[in-house]
Image (cartoon, rainbow, N blue to C red):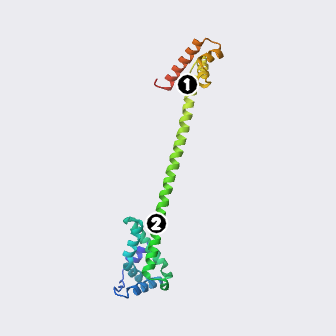
Amino acid sequence: MSEMDRLFRRRGPLRAVSTDGSATDELASLLRAAGRGDEVAFRGFYRSVVRLVYGTVLRVVRDPAIAEEVTQEVFVELWRLAPRFDGSKGSARGWTATVAHRRAVDRVRSEQARRDRDERDAQQSAVAYDSVSEEVTDNLDRVRVRAALDSLSDTQREAVSLAYYGGHTYREVASLLDIAEGTAKTRIRDGLIKLRDIMGVTP
């Protein structure tokens, strides 16, 4: 059971808070008593300001479910900070609203930071995935091409390599291999047809 559950589920009478002009003084008295460890006083304080706290938080976070969570966090903080309350520096109500607002702003900033972090992580993962995928695909293509070239005859592989990796024309291939230009064309054509069939490329 949480500290807040223990405080508010414990049986015991709640102190009533006056609704006349003395309400502010009574609220400060409850808060000071809570600061001395009086749990009954703090339950009375809770009942008096819970709407104020929830409304303050909701205006900042905009989400009722999150507002409920933050409201509980605010009261945990108020219980812990109660001994520090100084009525000479402001009213208990104003102090409570300030604590609630600060906590709500912290939650919004935390949520935004989490969303920004998740978005950055997602973008980085996507970039890394694309980069790895391209690298793997390129490597696989090179492996497939090398394997396909190895399946050609020596004369076909030589002619195809000169034409497509060396950038030579049919005439230059024929000259380099000391063969007729028609022979060079035939070797290149037959080699490419075989490569196409091996790699499953649709013409």
Q: Is residue 155 visible?
A: yes
Q: In the drawing, does residue 190 fall left or right of residue 60?
A: right
Residue 182 point in image, percent of width and height: 57, 12
Q: Residue furthest left?
A: 19
Residue in the picture at 38% in, 64% down: 63
Residue 28 drawn at (x, y percent): 43, 85
In terms of secondary structure, where does tag 2 sit? helix
**Near-viewer residue (115 or 45):** 115
Q: Position of residue 16 (x, y in %)?
A: 35, 85
Q: On screen, 43 above or below 115?
A: below
Determine whether, in the image, residue 177 is placed left or right of residue 23: right
Q: Is residue 121 above or below residue 97?
A: above
Circle 1: element type: helix
Alpha carbon separation for disc pair 1 and 2: 60 Å
> Looking at the picture, does residue 28 appear above or below residue 191?
below
Judge by depth and name the residue closer to the eye, 62 or 121.
62
- In this rendering, would 31 be left or right of 124? left
The residue wearing badge 2 is 107
Q: Residue at x 42, y 71 (%)?
A: 72
Q: Which quadrant of the structure image shows residue 3?
A: bottom left
- Give the residue at mark 1: 148
Rendered-image quadrant of the N terminus: bottom left
Foreground: disc 1 or disc 2: 2
Q: Amino acid at mark 1?
A: Ala
Who comes first in sequence, dot 1 or dot 2? Answer: 2
Image marks 1 and 2: residues in contact by CB distance under 8 Å: no
Residue 148, percent from left and from top: 55, 25
Which residue is at 46% across, 68% downward? Answer: 105
- Kind of residue at badge 2: Arg
**Which residue appears at 51% of the width and 53% of the height?**
120
